[in-house]
Amino acid sequence: MADAPSLQLRWAQGEVFSSRKRFRVLVAGRRFGKSYLSCIELLRGAIEKPGETFFYCAPTYRMAKDIAWKALKRLVPKAWIKSKNETDLKIELVNGSTIELKGTENAMALRGRSLSGVVLDEAAFMDSEVWFEVIRPALADKQGWALFISTPDGTASWFYDLWCYCEEDDNDWCRWQFTTIEGDNVPPEEIEAARSQLDPRTFRQEFEASFENLSGLVAVSFSDANIDPKVQDLPIVPLLVGVDFNIDPMSAICAVKKGDDLWVFDEIIMTGGATTWDLCEEIQRRFGVERRIIACPDPTGGARKTSGVGATDHNILRKSGFKVSSPRSPWKIRDKITCVNTALLDASGNRRLFIHPRCKDLIKSLRTLTYAPGTGLPNKNLGVDHAFDALGYMCLQVFNLAKPETMKSTDYRVW
């Protein structure tokens, strides 16, 4: 086809693009240019094999549309396009080839297609069945190719196993691992600034493309350096209360902002079936009804009624005179863990979260909460997660280092 667009790739992208191996695995840091490379790969495939079908797959339909659809439309010259479907995210070229963008949240819906090539973007965040049960069989009759591109997601995943498989002597497979800085799309000063917004393990994973083992302790950044008997209440500033709505125990973490730091000076752990009303009464008993109190609760409390009455947990907090600071949608568990660890110790070596020794349940939670075996999720069976969760909701609101899924930044603010 004539009038080919002028395409430019960075050196690291070019290393991947130049390989003609059938199966390629790229592990790269954030903002490496993975999606741009994906679109160029698909366009090349569609040009080289007229009349064939090529997929771009992302973990969800929304991600496929947001990440790659605009980039793909910019790359393909209008003269090459026979038809374009904005709903199905499908472009048909004049040579009969089609490029389709797919979400893999319903992998079985993709079955039955014959493919000549596919890019699995953020493959680590897809279920293994997407590759093994759907995409791999779809490539069989055309002997199609696959490019796996992703940031890492720990070592307890099928994607890590695939990465390790590439070490074996298989002429069809090859792999690369590039950091964000090697992608040459992000200036060094921006990467350094990110160190203060992520804990060391998350920084290594997201910017250095390192497979981090999500086993062992959840609060990997916590140490005795975060325990300080000098931490105290500052009555002249608002009282911050992180709340985990659990029937037994009902947990609250009490803190104040001291400059850029968060001082956790008290905790309230109520057992015996205490309600949200009981928690509010206890907070006011300790700190007075005139104190300005900002509650940072579990976002799901906006609809849940753990107190067994008509009002939701959030409305009970409001009726008790508290300001509720919470997004409309739940936080990702990963975001909560990252935010707590970043406050405890960020990748630049700064600690912004200090806890008084009297907060024994919280300290126990930070010291003993581990991941459930073979997962990236905290082990709820240990019974020590409630104080951690209450602290996590507060850290997410105070430090604002992450955004809840499906939310716009204008939907919430700290205070």
Image (tube, rainbow, N blue to C red):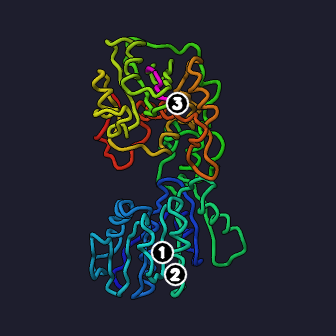
Report the amino acid beneath label 3: Ala
Left or right of 413? Residue 60 is: right
User: Residue 118, labelled with which disc?
Assistant: 1
Report the amino acid beneath label 1: Val
Q: Where is residue 156 in the image (x, y as percent from the top left)?
A: 62, 55
At 63% from the left and 53% from the top, the residue drawn is 374
Q: Name the residue under label 3.
A: 387
Q: Earlier in the sequence, mark 3 or mark 2?
A: 2
Q: Which of marks 2 and 1 is nearer the N terminus?
A: 1
Q: In this view, does 334 lie above or below 118?
A: above
Q: Position of residue 87 (x, y in %)?
A: 27, 69
Q: Which of marks 3 and 2 is in front?
A: 3
In three-dimensional space, the C-alpha distance between marks 1 and 3, rounded to whole angstroms, equals 44 Å
Question: How many residues crowd mark 2 within 10 Å: few (<14), some (14–19), many (20+)?
Answer: some
Q: Where is residue 269 in the image (x, y as percent from the top left)?
A: 50, 24
* Residue 250 among magenta residues: yes
Q: Position of residue 336 (x, y in %)?
A: 48, 40
Of residues 44 and 120, which is closer to you in this image?
Answer: 120
In three-dimensional space, the C-alpha distance between marks 2 and 1, rounded to whole angstroms, equals 8 Å
Q: Which of marks 1 and 3 is in front?
A: 3
Q: What element carries label 1?
A: strand
Q: Earlier in the sequence, mark 1 or mark 3?
A: 1
Asked if disc 1 and disc 3 are in contact, CB closer than 8 Å, the reply is no
| Residues rendered magenta in the picture | 249-256
At 52% from the left and 87% from the top, the residue drawn is 141
* Residue 303 among magenta residues: no
User: Residue 139, labelled with which disc?
Assistant: 2
Q: Nearer the viewer, mark 2 or mark 1?
A: 2
User: Residue 2, labelled with which disc?
Assistant: none
Report the amino acid beneath label 2: Leu
Residue 15's image quarter? bottom right
